[in-house]
Image (cartoon, helix red, strand yellow):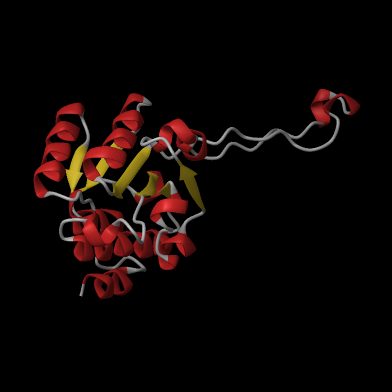
Amino acid sequence: MLMDDQDSQLVLVDFQSRLMPVIFEGEQVLANALRLAQAAHLFEIPTFGTEQNPDKLGPNPQAMRDVCRRTLSKMSFSACEEGLVDVLRPIPRPQGGNARSLPKHLQKAVPSTPKRETIVIAGVEAHICLLQTALDLLQEEFQVFVVTDACGSRTERNRDAAFDRLAGAGAELVTTEMVLFEWLRSADADPFHEIQALIK
């Protein structure tokens, strides 16, 4: 199954200032995460960030925060424990006013937002916060695509163990370029040159 930009949401987990310097291949991991964020912005894909204990670990990069619709502060390792699912599947709010004041045939229907059930996720640490969040998203029956070259841990072994477990649980393991070109689908699509520039 290919990723579809119209069905996707992007989740960026804990790319925080005090954490990234100790992540294995951290510079490349962060660069790929920023590419994903910029591409999602071009495609108007809803993007959300998380920050684990930001008072201790600092914020995500400002360039990432700027493209996120919301950045969730959390203490639980899984962002789903702190409301991520509610953000990804918002419940439509009823129209304002007293519903009883109008006859049923005059009441406006609550517009439904199309569901986006594909979650593209990247983050650190891969074997802790990224893993637990992704497993919970799978439990919630999202289609989960883990962007391996935009995920990291302090050690390569921990990162790879997380990928093994996620693949076994049903997550799709992909790379940044796989995501960008599946969102794009065609060389004559509007943002082709902008996406090409992100890769170069």
Residue 95 higher or lower than 66, as above or below: above
Where residue 163 sits in the image (x, y, percent)? 15, 39
- Say whether residue 141 is left or right of residue 180: right
Residue 89 higher or lower than 15, as above or below: above
Locate the N terminus and report the quarter of the image it occupies.
Answer: top left
Locate the C terminus and report the quarter of the image it occupies.
Answer: bottom left
As rendered, which of 58 and 129 lies closer to the eye? 58
- Whether residue 136 is visible, yes or no, is yes
Residue 198 figure quarter: bottom left
Where residue 90 sits in the image (x, y, percent)? 55, 36
Where residue 94 sits in the image (x, y, percent)? 71, 33
Query: Residue, x 88% and y 28% (percent of image)?
Result: 102
Query: Residue, x 44% and y 39% (percent of image)?
Result: 75
Query: Residue, x 29% and y 30% (percent of image)?
Result: 135
Residue 35 figure quarter: bottom left
As rendered, which of 116 and 37 lies closer to the eye? 37
As rendered, which of 130 and 105 lies closer to the eye? 130
As rendered, which of 194 and 71 lies closer to the eye? 71
Where residue 49 sits in the image (x, y, percent)? 43, 51
- Whether residue 48 is visible, yes or no, is no
Query: Residue, x 15% and y 45% (percent of image)?
Result: 159
